[in-house]
Amino acid sequence: MGRQELEYPREANNTVKRYPEKAKYELETIHKIINSAQIVHVAFNAPNGEGFPSILPMIGKMGSYERPSADIGDVLDLYLHGYVSSRIINLGRSASSDSSESSESPGLPVSISAASVDGIVLALTPNAHSYNFRSALLFGHATLVTDPQEKLYAMELVTNSVAPRRWQTSRTPPNAGEMASTSILRVKIRNGSAKVRVGGPNDSREDMENSAMREKVWAGVIPVHTVLGEAVPAAYNVAGDKMPEYLDEWRREENEENERYAREVSGLKYPGGKKEQAI
Amino acid sequence: MGRQELEYPREANNTVKRYPEKAKYELETIHKIINSAQIVHVAFNAPNGEGFPSILPMIGKMGSYERPSADIGDVLDLYLHGYVSSRIINLGRSASSDSSESSESPGLPVSISAASVDGIVLALTPNAHSYNFRSALLFGHATLVTDPQEKLYAMELVTNSVAPRRWQTSRTPPNAGEMASTSILRVKIRNGSAKVRVGGPNDSREDMENSAMREKVWAGVIPVHTVLGEAVPAAYNVAGDKMPEYLDEWRREENEENERYAREVSGLKYPGGKKEQAI
């Protein structure tokens, strides 16, 4: 029991400067925020971008092809599914390669963000309004997965993260055309960070002492959570009107857990001593 | 009636190449997706970033200080609230300036993305799984708002976008310290695009003809929407246990509309003729 909890090193690019009391560097915290997000945002520099980074919503899940049983708090890779032109990936590769055959190129530098809003924090004054939220950043180098076995591993990881057991309960394996048309990026993580805000509003002493104003302005939190609704069968579905029980159970559990978390953190006292603004 | 609907110009950086049939360039569509997002992701290049763009979750709302009554489909600026080091903004400014006193610098190039998942699309095979989603991208140049009147305009815009009428119903105006500690960025938009996916799964002819498999694999959509829950009063709230009615009414309307949209698009036939992958 009790192995030391791993943390990402604090370097210039990932050290949180604003509200550092909310910053977290543990791999487990960061990886869980990434995995719980339905989409992540991926930013990178494309050639001829004129200074504008590219930014894309993608599906991103933490995993390890070498050690598939690795814990969420271990050193992991991020697998990204979604469309990134292979031209860009290849340019990233050649730009960072020293053109020696034997050198491994690190890949395209990518920055990844996942964020969820858990509550709207209504304070006595707009300046102290905020969101309860969980956000995570990862920085790393992306390369295209070319090994078919690793690609299959990542496709199963991504599929079963979007809906559990779906890889095992739908038509697999992918055929040759599906394998060829699917792009998976593996991001070797360099570092990362997370920020989490929980609790009620945190107003200034001055506003707290203005009792006439406090009688008028309602202060509190509107919890926010995502709901997976009742399934709608496809027009061509012939496998029963109702979604399979294992999926419906997962849906209900997700909803309960998301609602519970948003409600629980809404009722907490804001833990920081510092005045709070919006994110 | 019937002014032509404005579109952003299709330039190299914003023309959608993957699934172009889902691409949209109308200002109204793009601006509405941005405004409906509780957070947007903002990417830009900071000095010494070693090729990694910075990426931050922020609050972003479309507005026009010069023409506050402008329609959502008009040419608008994006106002961003959240922490961006003024050092970075100033560096962006000087880098793009030609050092002549009279020249206006365009500001820091920023890329903005907003995305919402509206449904998990379960197809017969993992390859045809997808999300229903709405996503929007904007590209523009960001500068710090320094005019106090414009700053107040943007603070009210942002506050009332997070919770309606909150500016009018909480303690305003901000005091000098609050004005000084609040950073607002104005982004002059250069162009943008949006992508929207609606409808049920879209499987291949080959899978559709495999009737033994189709009996086993359930196909359809799990609608996804955000819920604003029952408000939790702050420990120090003295303005009644219940949230004011105008806020509760807004909360219920938002929930109904979000649920309706996710459910409605889940039941549609996928409109594209092309095979669909995840985003």
Image: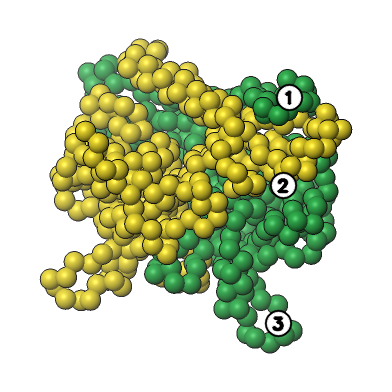
Chain colours: A green, B yellow
Q: Is residue B160 left or right of residue B271?
A: left
Q: Nearer the viewer, residue B246 or B76?
A: B76
Q: Position of residue A88 (x, y in %)?
A: 56, 68
Chain containing the residue with disc 1: A
Reading the image, the residue beneath label 3 is A103
**Quadrant hosting residue B38:** top left
What SS does tag 1 mark? loop
Whether residue A241 is visible to the viewer of this picture, yes or no, is: yes
Both labels 1 and 2 in a single chain: no
Whether residue A250 is visible to the viewer of this picture, yes or no, is: no
Q: Residue at x 22, y 26 (%)?
A: B168
Q: Position of residue A264 (x, y in %)?
A: 56, 25
What SS does tag 3 mark? loop
Q: Position of residue B12 (x, y in %)?
A: 42, 64
Whole-angstrom CA distance, mark 1 to mark 2, is 19 Å
Q: Is residue B250 left or right of residue A195?
A: left
Chain containing the residue with disc 2: B
Reading the image, the residue beneath label 2 is B127
Task: Decide: is B176 above or below B17.
Answer: above
Q: Amino acid at mark 1?
A: Met
Whole-angstrom CA distance, mark 3 to mark 1, is 50 Å
For the N terminus of chain B, the quadrant is: top left
What SS does tag 2 mark? helix
Reading the image, the residue beneath label 1 is A243
Both labels 2 and 3 in a single chain: no
Q: Amino acid at mark 3?
A: Ser
Q: Nearer the viewer, residue B152 or B222?
A: B222
**Mark 2 and mark 1 in contact (Cβ < 8 Å)?**
no
Chain containing the residue with disc 3: A
User: Quick one: label 1, few (<14), some, or many (20+) residues within 10 Å?
Assistant: many
| Mark closer to the observer (2, 3) | 2
